[in-house]
Image (cartoon, grey):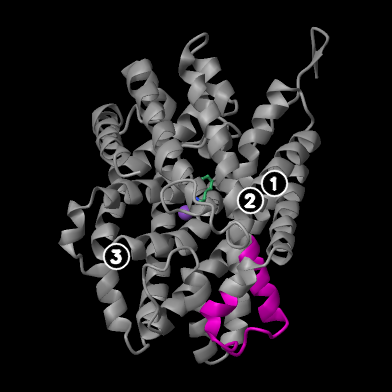
C-alpha cells in the first residue's frame, strides 16, 4: 500500500499461534540439540554440566524467551527496529546490531555443519556409509572435512535451500515442514535412545550424562559453556525470536507458548544425550572429541543396529530438516532488517545476506583443511572461534540487554502487558528473574569468563 508516496510493505504474519509455535520450535530444535549439545556436554564433564545447563534454561532461558518474543510482538519490527520503535532516540537499538552480527556468525558455521549432515545423508542414500570405512568412521570424517571443495559444495547446497525457503516467505514453507518433520524427528530420537541404552557400555555413558562429577563446578568455563549452550539452543539473544514474535498478532497468549518451546528444546537435547553418550562409551570414543563427535558416534550405532541403514537415512534426513528450520530463522534476522532499512525486496535481502553467510562458511570449512592451523581465539579453529564469540559473548549480551530493557526501561505494567502476564500468578517471579536474577547471573558468568578466553 502507498502512504504519502512511499511504498510501505505489508509485514507478514503467522497463520495461527500454532504456526508460530511450530516455527519457533523449528528454530530452537536443530543442530544445537544434537551436534552441539553432545560435544559441549562431553567437553565440560557431562552430568554437572547438564545440571548447570538445565538451571540456565529454567532461570534465564525461558524467562528471556518470553521477553524476546514479547518485545518483537509489541514492536512488530526486526531486531534493530524493535528497540528503535519502543525506545526512540535511545541507544538500546545498538544491541540489535550485535544480534545481526551474531546471526551472520552462527549461520556461517551452522551451514557448514549442516552441509556435513547433508553429505552423510547422501552417503547413506547411496550406501557408502553402511559399512565402516577402512580406518573407521572418525578417520573418514576427518578425511572428508579436510578436503577443500567437497564440503563447500554441501555447505553451498544447504545455503541455497535455506535461501530459497526464506525467499518464498515464512508462512507456507516452514509451517508445513515443521508440522510433518518435528514428530518424525522426535520418534526417531526416541527409537535411537531406546536402542543406544542397550549397548555394552551404556551404563558408563548414562553415568557420564546423569551422574554429576561435582569437581568440574570449580571450573568457571563450565558455567559460560552451559549458559552459551542454553542461549544457542533456545535461539536466544540474536533476535530470531524477536523477529518471529514480530509476525505474531496481539491476540495470542505468549507465556504458555514460550514454556512449551523451552520444554521441547530441552527434551530434544536430553534425549539426544541419551542416544549419544552410551554409544560414545560403547565404541571407545573420547567424549571430549569436540564438534565431530556425533558424526563419528552415530554411524557406529547405525552400523550395528538391525535396519541401521534405513534408520540412518531417516535420522540424517530429520537432522537436515531440523537444521533447515533453524537456519531459516537465522537468515530471517538480517533479511527482515535489510528489507526495512534498505527497502530491499525479500529476494534481494535474502540473496545478499545469504551470500555473505556463504562466504563466512567458506572460511569455516577451510578451517578443517588447509587453514586448520588458523586459531583466532586460544587454540580454537575458525568454527570454534566464531561459535565462541557468538554463543558465549554476543548471545548472552543480547539476552542481558533484553532483560534490562523489559525489566527496567518498561514500567512494571508495560512489561506485564507486553508478555501477557498481567493476570498471571507468576508475573512477579518472572519480573524478579528478568530484573535481577538473570542480569546478575549473566554478568557474573560473563566476568568470570573474561579471563579464561
Ligand atoms: N537453536 C538452534 C539450534 O539449537 C540454533 C539457533 C541459534 C537458531 C540462534 C537461531 C538462533 O540448532
Ligand atoms: Na536447540
Q: Along the horizontal axis of the image, is 447 left or right of 417?
A: left
In the visual, does 113 lie left or right of 10? left
The percent coordinates of residue 404 (x first, y second) are: 35, 24
**SS type, badge 2:** helix
State the image coordinates of residue 324 (x, y, percent, origin top left): 64, 56
Asked whether residue 246 is in view, the answer is yes
Give the foreground label among 3 and 2: 2
Who comes first in sequence, dot 3 or dot 2?
3
Neighbourhood count class around disc 1 (C-alpha, 10 Å): few under 14, some 14–19, many 20 upward = some
Instruction: State the residue in front, 428 or 330.
Output: 330
User: Is the residue 351 above or below the residue 131 in the image?
Assistant: above
The range drawn in magenta is: 115-141
Q: Label for residue 359?
A: 1
Task: Classify residue 283 by image quadrant.
Answer: bottom left
Q: Which of label 1 and label 2 is nearer to you? A: 2
Q: Which residue is mark 2?
A: 363
Cα separation, mark 1 vs mark 2, equals: 7 Å
Q: Residue at label 3?
A: 46
Q: Nearer the viewer, residue 328 or 26?
A: 328
**In the rendered view, would you say 268 is above or below 308?**
above
Rendered residue at 57%/40% (across/down) = 103
Q: Is 119 colored magenta in this rendering?
A: yes
Q: Quadrant of the N terminus?
A: top right
Residue visible at 41% across and 65% down in the picture: 38
Residue at x-position 39% and y-position 51%: 229
Q: In which quadrant is the C terminus drawn?
A: top left
Marks 1 and 3 sit apart, C-alpha to C-alpha, by 34 Å
Of marks 1 and 3, which one's residue comes earlier in the chain?
3
Amino acid at each position: 500500500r502507498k502512504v504519502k508516496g512511499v511504498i510501505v510493505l505489508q509485514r507478514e504474519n503467522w497463520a495461527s499461534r500454532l504456526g508460530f509455535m511450530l516455527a519457533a520450535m523449528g528454530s530452537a530444535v536443530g543442530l544445537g540439540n544434537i551436534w552441539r549439545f553432545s560435544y559441549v556436554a562431553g567437553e565440560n564433564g557431562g552430568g554437572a554440566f547438564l545440571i548447570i545447563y538445565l538451571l540456565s534454561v529454567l532461570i534465564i532461558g525461558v524467562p528471556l524467551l518470553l521477553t524476546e518474543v514479547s518485545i518483537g510482538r509489541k514492536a512488530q519490527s526486526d531486531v534493530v527496529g524493535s528497540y528503535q520503535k519502543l525506545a526512540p532516540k535511545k541507544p538500546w537499538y545498538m544491541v540489535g546490531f550485535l544480534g545481526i552480527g551474531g546471526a551472520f556468525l552462527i549461520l556461517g558455521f551452522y551451514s557448514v555443519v549442516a552441509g556435513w549432515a547433508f553429505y552423510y545423508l547422501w552417503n547413506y542414500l547411496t550406501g557408502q556409509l553402511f559399512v565402516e570405512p577402512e580406518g573407521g568412521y572418525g578417520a573418514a570424517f576427518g578425511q572428508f572435512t579436510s578436503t577443500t571443495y567437497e564440503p563447500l559444495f554441501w555447505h553451498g547446497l544447504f545455503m541455497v535451500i535455506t535461501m530459497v525457503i526464506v525467499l518464498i516467505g515464512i508462512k507456507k514453507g516452514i509451517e508445513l515442514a515443521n508440522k510433518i518433520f518435528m514428530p518424525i524427528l522426535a520418534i526417531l530420537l526416541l527409537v535411537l535412545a531406546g536402542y543406544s541404552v542397550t549397548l555394552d557400555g551404556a551404563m558408563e555413558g548414562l553415568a557420564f550424562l546423569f551422574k554429576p562429577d561435582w569437581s568440574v563446578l570449580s571450573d568457571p568455563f563450565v558455567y559460560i559453556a552451559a549458559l552459551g549452550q542454553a542461549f544457542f539452543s533456545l535461539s536466544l539473544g540474536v533476535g530470531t525470536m524477536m523477529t518471529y514474535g514480530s509476525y505474531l498478532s496481539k491476540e495470542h497468549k505468549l507465556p504458555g507458548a514460550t514454556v512449551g518451546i523451552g520444554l521441547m528444546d530441552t527434551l530434544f537435547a536430553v534425549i539426544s544425550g541419551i542416544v549419544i553418550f552410551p554409544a560414545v562409551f560403547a565404541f571407545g570414543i573420547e567424549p571430549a572429541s569436540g564438534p565431530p563427535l556425533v558424526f563419528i558416534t552415530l554411524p557406529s550405532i547405525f552400523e550395528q543396529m538391525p535396519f541401521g541403514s534405513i534408520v540412518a537415512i531417516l535420522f540424517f534426513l530429520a537432522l537436515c530438516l531440523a537444521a533447515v528450520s533453524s537456519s531459516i530463522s537465522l537468515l530471517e534476522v538480517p533479511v527482515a532488517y535489510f528489507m526495512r532499512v534498505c527497502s530491499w525486496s525479500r529476494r534481494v535481502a535474502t540473496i545478499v545476506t545469504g551470500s555473505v553467510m556463504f562466504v563466512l562458511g567458506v572460511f569455516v570449512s577451510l578451517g578443517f583443511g588447509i587453514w586448520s592451523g588458523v586459531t583466532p581465539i586460544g587454540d580454537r579453529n575458525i568454527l570454534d572461534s566464531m561459535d565462541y564469540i557468538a554463543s558465549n559473548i554476543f548471545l548472552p549480551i543480547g539476552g542481558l540487554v533484553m532483560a534490562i530493557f523489559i525489566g527496567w526501561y518498561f514500567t512494571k505494567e508495560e512489561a506485564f502487558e507486553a508478555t501477557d502476564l498481567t493476570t498471571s500468578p507468576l508475573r512477579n517471579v518472572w519480573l524478579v528473574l528478568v530484573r535481577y536474577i538473570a542480569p546478575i547471573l549473566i554478568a557474573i558468568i560473563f566476568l568470570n569468563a573474561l579471563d579464561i578466553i
